[in-house]
Structures are given as structure tokens and as C-alpha cells.
Image (cartoon, rainbow, N blue to C red):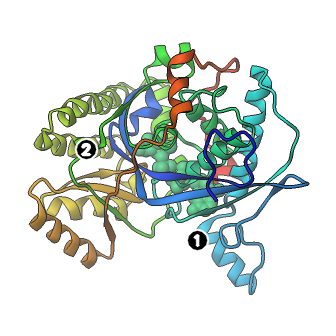
């Protein structure tokens, strides 16, 4: 049973958080930049909170596997999926939620609950599967403790990010913003706003401004921590090429907002391609991975615009020439062994209480934290 988000004494609370696509500007969210991102209905994580005598974090029967047929089954599983599932994300979300409430003097009742989760977001494909689990859990806690009004929408993405940082998962803010707000969001992470408020400036755009988009993905888990670490270090060291290229990437989101508002889709296509080309120059082919690059190239060979949704594993494609081009793209993906689906955009996820928090006050954290943590710690090894 799904509860009304503002209900004070819910029996069972269930929330979904959706996979996200970085449409333009990523990864500049990790580098004081700007992005346009959207939440998609194709994949999601759901978290269920049930009142219980003890506080219980329920392992997922497949994602948190601890029982194996044999030693080789165990090793195979670890090699393909890594050591971790979602349990640690649920735990870290509870911890960060509690710390923020303490810090802000927000009273929490002392009833207990059980948290369980499920997800169909392809694992580690740059669709933000990790933060979907954390985000859905965070929403459940907001309702269980009835504190939606006290923890404003603008600060929630940062708190969800803190939960992942607690675990050493390397990530930026765009994922969590898209997942908290839903729909299509323009985000500006300029340093002045981040330092002053602990969050960026986020504006929801009308989802009907979007042309039809396609999502291409493959069984090809990639670790955003590994992908980002060298570039991040160069950026921190003041590397001029990285700094100016990141600024260019951030500007693509600015130009993309105008292109969307004017429904100038030829421009949108150009910007998407430029976005990937800049990423490729900065990160290099070895870091991006041959299969990921091939996903982009497959789309480009039929004249579609294409770029990564996140740090690798999935690609967002736009066919400016319409239905015949979509057919050609679908055929090309099938031949290459890639999955392709039309993107289904999620509408805004904000309810009336959430919307009120957008105007009532500044949502700051007393304890300020960096948006992105490096070097990437051992826990991040999949
Ligand atoms: N589908 C999933 N099921 C369970 N846990 C997941 C899943 N996807 C991610 N995680 C958890 O999140 C961590 C980091 O994932 P990450 O590399 O950020 O992937 P993504 O790009 O999907 O967010 C994993 O080590 C794991 O603990
Ligand atoms: O490189 C990117 O575009 C994104 O990488 C991470 O997302 P992921 O889904 O793990 O690939 C990071 O969390 C985002 O902030 C970056 O924009
Ligand atoms: Mg992630």
C-alpha cells in the first residue's frame, strides 16, 4: 500500500526513485558546473518501510546474496557484481538522516521500522542505481517521521549524497537532484551558491519540451569512482585543459536550456554530441571503455545524437530525423547486442508539502561537506 506522503502515522510506506539520464552538462555537476537531467520511468528502485518491534534492514534475496551453491558460484558472483548490494545504502541513509535531524534539532519519535528494497535499475550502468535506493529510503524516512516540511527539497539531494559518501561511493549531485525532484531539471552548481547554501539552484522544466529520446545500454558494469578519479585529480591540481573543458561542458547545459525552451532540436542534437566529444577528450578512451564508446558510435553511425547518461554503461540517443532513423537505430543496436528502449519521462515527484519547502527558508547544513570525495577509497571496489 502506498501512503500519502504527508500522512502522520503511516502503516506501510513505499517510495520509488527512478533511474536518471544526464541529458546535457554532465559530468560538470561534479566540477561546479551545470546539468540538465531527467528521471525515467523505464527503471526504478523501491523501498518499503513497515513499523516493527526492532529496527530491521532486510537484505535483498538476490542483490545481497549470502548463500551460494558452491565456492565458484560465490567467486563468480563477486567478480561480476562486486561485494556490495543495497543494504549498506539503506543503513547509511538512516545514519545520515539521523545526523541531520540531530544537527537541526528536528525531533524524531522512537518507534522502530523494517526497511526492505527492490530495484530493476541495471547495475552500475550510469543510470544512478545506487542513489535510487538511497533516495527511495530517504523518502520513506521523511514520511515515517513526518518531517517532510522540516527537511526541504533543496537540501535532500545533498543529504542523500552524504549517505553514499559515508560509504566511499564516488558520486555527484545531479543524480540525486533528478531523483528528488522528478521530471526534467536544470541544475546550476556554481561554487558561490554551493558554498553559501550547501545546494545548487534547481529549476524544473516542462517535460513536454523534450523530443523523443532513446536509452541504449549493455551488460557492462562500470565504476564511476574509477572513471572519475584521474580527471578529478587533474581538475583539483588546476589543469587548464580540464578546467576550461569542464566549463565548456557546463555551458552546454546553459545553451541546452535555451534550445529546449525554443524547441530547437537541431541545436539540442549538436550539444549532445559536443558533450560526449568533450568527455572523450578529457577522460580518454581507455577510461571510458571500448564498449561504452561503441554504444555512442552505433547511434552516430545512423545520424543520431548520443552521449553517456552518466559515467558509462548507458547512452541517451536522439534521432532528429524521426521514425525511420529510430528504426535504423533499433536495428543497429540489436545487431551490436545492445538493448534499446524509448525513454519514458517521470513527471515531477514533488507534492504540495515539498513545494512549500522550496519557498519557506534556506536549507543549509551546519556541517558542510565537499560534493565529491576523492581519492576513491577501498570500499568503492565493486
Ligand atoms: N542494482 C543494484 N542492486 C543493489 N545494489 C546496488 C545496485 N546498483 C548499485 N548498488 C549499490 O551501489 C553501489 C555503487 O553503485 P554505482 O557504481 O554508483 O552504480 P550506479 O551508477 O548504478 O549508481 C554498489 O557498490 C552497490 O552497493
Ligand atoms: O560522469 C557522469 O556523468 C556522472 O557520474 C556519476 O554518475 P553514475 O550514474 O554513477 O555514472 C556521478 O554520480 C554524476 O554526478 C556524474 O554526472
Ligand atoms: Mg551511483
Q: Quadrant of residue 59?
A: bottom right
Estimate the x, y position of residue 271 in percent, counting from the top left: 20, 40
Estimate the x, y position of residue 344 in percent, counting from the top left: 34, 57
Badge 1 density bin: few <14, some 14–19, many ≥20, Cα 10 Å: few
Relative to 299, 77 lies left or right: right
Callout 2–callout 1 Cβ contact below 8 Å: no
Q: Which residue is mark 2?
A: 208
**Of the residues tagged 2 and 1, which is closer to the observer?**
2
Q: Nearer the viewer, residue 301 or 135?
A: 135
Single out the residue that lies furthest toward the right.
53
Res 227 seen here: no
Q: CA distance from mark 2 to mark 1?
A: 38 Å
Whether disc 1's CB lies below 8 Å from ligand 1 is answered no
Q: Earlier in the sequence, mark 2 or mark 1?
A: 1
Estimate the x, y position of residue 170 in percent, counting from the top left: 57, 43
Residue at x 12% of width, y 64% of height = 323
- Regarding mark 2 in the picture, which secondary structure is present there? helix
Question: In what quadrant of the picture does the N terminus appear?
Answer: bottom right
Q: Which residue is mark 1?
A: 80
Residue at x 81% of width, y 27% of height = 107
Res 16 seen here: yes
Estimate the x, y position of residue 200 in percent, counting from the top left: 47, 24
Relative to 259, 40 lies left or right: right
When the figure is inspected, residue 346 is found, relative to residue 262, above or below; the finding is below
Residue at x 71% of width, y 72% of height = 61
Q: Quadrant of residue 114?
A: bottom right
Badge 2 density bin: few <14, some 14–19, many ≥20, Cα 10 Å: few
- Regarding mark 1 in the picture, which secondary structure is present there? helix
Amino acid at each position: 500500500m502506498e501512503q500519502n506522503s504527508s500522512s502522520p502515522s503511516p502503516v506501510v510506506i513505499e517510495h520509488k526513485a527512478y533511474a536518471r539520464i544526464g541529458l546535457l552538462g554532465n559530468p560538470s555537476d561534479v566540477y561546479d558546473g551545470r546539468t540538465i537531467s531527467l528521471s525515467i520511468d523505464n527503471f526504478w528502485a523501491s523501498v518499503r518501510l513497515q513499523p516493527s518491534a526492532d529496527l530491521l534492514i532486510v537484505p535483498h534475496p538476490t542483490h545481497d546474496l549470502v548463500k551460494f551453491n558452491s565456492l565458484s558460484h560465490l567467486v563468480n558472483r563477486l567478480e561480476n557484481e562486486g561485494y556490495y548490494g543495497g543494504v549498506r545504502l539503506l543503513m547509511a541513509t538512516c545514519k545520515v538522516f539521523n545526523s541531520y535531524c540531530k544537527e537541526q534539532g528536528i525531533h524524531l519519535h522512537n518507534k522502530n521500522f523494517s526497511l526492505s528494497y527492490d530495484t530493476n535499475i541495471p547495475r552500475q550502468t550510469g543510470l544512478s542505481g545506487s542513489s535510487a535506493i538511497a533516495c527511495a529510503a530517504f523518502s520513506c524516512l521523511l514520511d515515517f517521521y513526518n518531517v517532510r516540511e522540516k527537511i526541504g527539497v533543496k537540501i535532500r539531494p545533498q543529504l542523500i549524497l552524504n549517505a553514499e559518501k559515508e560509504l566511499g561511493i564516488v558520486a555527484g549531485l545531479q543524480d540525486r537532484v533528478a531523483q528528488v525532484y522528478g521530471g526534467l531539471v536544470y541544475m546550476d552548481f556554481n561554487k558561490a551558491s554551493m558554498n553559501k547554501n550547501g545546494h545548487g539552484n534547481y529549476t524544473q522544466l516542462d517535460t513536454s519540451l523534450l523530443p523523443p529520446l532513446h536509452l541504449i545500454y549493455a551488460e557492462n558494469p562500470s565504476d564511476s569512482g574509477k572513471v572519475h578519479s584521474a580527471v578529478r585529480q587533474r581538475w583539483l591540481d588546476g589543469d587548464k585543459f580540464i578546467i576550461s573543458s569542464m566549463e565548456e561542458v557546463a555551458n552546454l547545459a546553459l545553451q541546452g536550456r535555451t534550445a529546449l525552451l525554443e524547441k530547437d532540436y537541431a541545436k539540442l542534437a549538436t550539444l549532445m554530441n559536443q558533450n560526449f566529444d568533450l568527455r572523450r577528450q578529457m577522460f580518454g578512451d581507455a577510461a571510458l571503455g571500448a564498449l561504452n564508446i561503441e554504444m555512442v558510435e552505433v547511434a552516430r553511425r545512423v545520424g543520431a545524437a548520443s552521449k553517456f547518461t552518466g559515467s558509462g554503461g548507458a547512452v541517451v540517443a536522439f534521432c532528429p530525423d524521426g521514425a525511420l532513423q529510430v528504426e535504423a537505430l533499433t536495428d543497429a543496436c540489436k545487431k551490436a547486442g545492445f538493448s534499446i528502449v524509448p525513454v519514458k519521462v517521470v513527471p515531477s515527484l514533488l507534492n504540495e508539502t515539498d513545494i512549500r519547502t522550496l519557498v519557506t527558508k534556506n536549507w543549509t547544513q551546519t556541517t558542510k561537506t565537499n560534493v565529491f570525495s576523492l581519492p576513491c577509497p577501498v570500499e568503492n571496489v565493486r
